[in-house]
Structure formats: C-alpha cells, structure tokens
Amino acid sequence: MTSSPSHALSGPDPVKNARAYLCELYEGDTERAHRFRYGLLAFDVATVVFIIATSFAPDWPGVKVLDILVGLAVLADFSARLWISRSRWRELLHPATWADIVALISFLIAPLVGEGAGFLRIMRTLRLLRNYRILTRLRQDSPVFRRNEEVILAITNLFVFIFVMTGIVYATQHRSNPNIHNFVDALYFTVTSLTTTGYGDIVLKDTAGRLISVLIMIFGVTLFLRLAQVLFRPHKVRFPCPTCGLQRHDPDAVHCKACGTVLNIPDEGS
C-alpha cells in the first residue's frame, strides 16, 4: 500500500523522504507514479504546442508571462530529475540534458532579451525522446500504440528534427538573411530542403548556412525514408521470442522464423 504525500514527507529525515517520494514518482511502478509520468508527458506535449504556437505569433499578449511560468515548471522538473539521478555527471553529459538546459535558459531569459533567444525553446522538443519509461506503460495501456509504435516513434523523430532544425535556421539567419523574416520562413526552408524540393526562393548563402542545409538534407531524408519504411512494409507485431529473442513476427505467427520455438502472441481479437 502506497503512503500519502504528507506521510511520505514526514519523519526524522524529511529531505531523504522527499527524495524517496520523487524517486517513486519518476521511477516507481505504482499507480500514482504512472499517473504522474503520464502527466509529465502531457506537460511536454503541451509545452511543445505552446512553443510552436508562440513561434508563429511571438507578440501575442501574455506570452512573456507564460514563458516564465513554463520555464519555472521546466526548472522544477529538471531539478527533480537531477536530484534523484544515481549518476548526476552522466545525466549532465547526456546531449538531451544539454538541450533541456538550453531550453530552460531560453524560457527564463527570452522575456528579457526578446525573440532572438526565444527560438531556443524549441530544443524542448527533444524531451519527447526521453520518455523511455513511459513507452513500456504505453505498450501495456494502449492497443493503438502497440500496433503503431514504430510509426508513432518515426513521426515523433521527424517532427522533432524539423522543428529543432527550424529553430537553428531561424537563430543563425534571421539577422543576416533578408529571406528569413520569421519562424514560418525558417520552417518553409527546412521542409523544402528536407524533401530536396529546393524551390530556390530562400537560400542560405554563407558557409554556416550551407553546412546547416547539408545536415538538413542528410539527416532529414534519412528520417523521412525511415517513416516511409515503417508505413509501407508488411505489418509485424513486437513479441520477443523466449528462445532466440527475435522481436518482430507476423501477426498470426505460431513458430519463430529464426529458431522454430512455439510462440504465444497475445491476440486482441481484431
């Protein structure tokens, strides 16, 4: 039976109890922990929607106040995760942690220095790739996610890449490139480069811009082809073979194609 928050934080060592309570929420297997992590996922998605919406309308009234409020919430989440980490240096050296720090700074300083630093908030989209613990729960709770996990993850990867690269294009070009007036122009350039359409009405002329274009084309096309691959290849189900560990099988497979072991793949009746 799980204890209440007030009980968990009471006792002879409230700091130790508070850390244990946060460890349960972020890493535990209780119903309360599952609800908390779903709430974090919802917050991450809402944050990304807020970032994108305000990037198109940076002068929207109240956006500076919301920037600070979201930044404080991100700071609380970041501090809690770092506090309970068993290896803080490894956590700090992780590239996604750097992205979190950059986004956090941007949320808190963008209202002071203006739109030029506001683009850095887009780095928060990388947080969507760090919810590894919730993936297992989503597989258990959502038949739709189980059937379409690879497609959903491929779309997420492509989405994150597009908006991170759009932020980089905007940050590096909006002051020097007369064709990049706003976030929409940067998004337009990123998508046309990624699809190799290259209309030519917006180009990045300096050396740094050309290197950014190369990165967009190489990595963007790779992610786009990955999405096409998972969309059009024959449907498989994820079920580890108990003998050889093969992960993917035909939905109606009775035996593992690799080792012949009899499988017992759960069928939802569809």
Image (cartoon, rainbow, N blue to C red):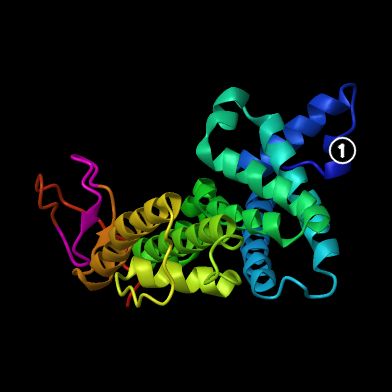
Answer with left or right where residue 123 lies relative to residue 235.
right
Q: Quadrant of residue 19?
A: top right
Instruction: Tell me: 107 left or right of 244.
Output: right
Picture layout, residue 93 above or below residue 144: above
Task: Please tell me whether mark 1 sits on a helix, a strand or a loop.
Answer: helix
Give the residues drawn in magenta, as a range: 241-254
Tally of numbered discs? 1
- Where does the image place residue 111, in percent across and percent down from the top left? 81, 57
Q: Residue type at mark 1? A: His
Q: Is residue 135 visible?
A: yes
Quadrant where the image shows the C terminus: bottom left
Magenta span main SS: loop
Disc 1 crowd rating (10 Å Cα; few below 14, some 14-19, many 20+) is few
Q: Looking at the image, which residue is at 63% across and 53% down?
A: 120
The N terminus lies in which quarter of the figure?
A: top right
Task: Work out whether residue 16 or residue 205 is closer to the camera in this orientation and state it.
Answer: 205
Q: Residue at x 59, y 39 (%)?
A: 97
- Is 243 magenta? The answer is yes
Residue under numbered circle 1: 7
Q: Is residue 187 above or below residue 257?
A: below
Instruction: Tell me residue 248's x, y (percent).
Output: 23, 55
Q: Residue at x 60, y 72 (%)?
A: 181
Magenta stretch encompasses residue 221: no
Whole-percent x and y of residue 214?
33, 55
The reply, left or right, for residue 156 in relation to residue 120 is left
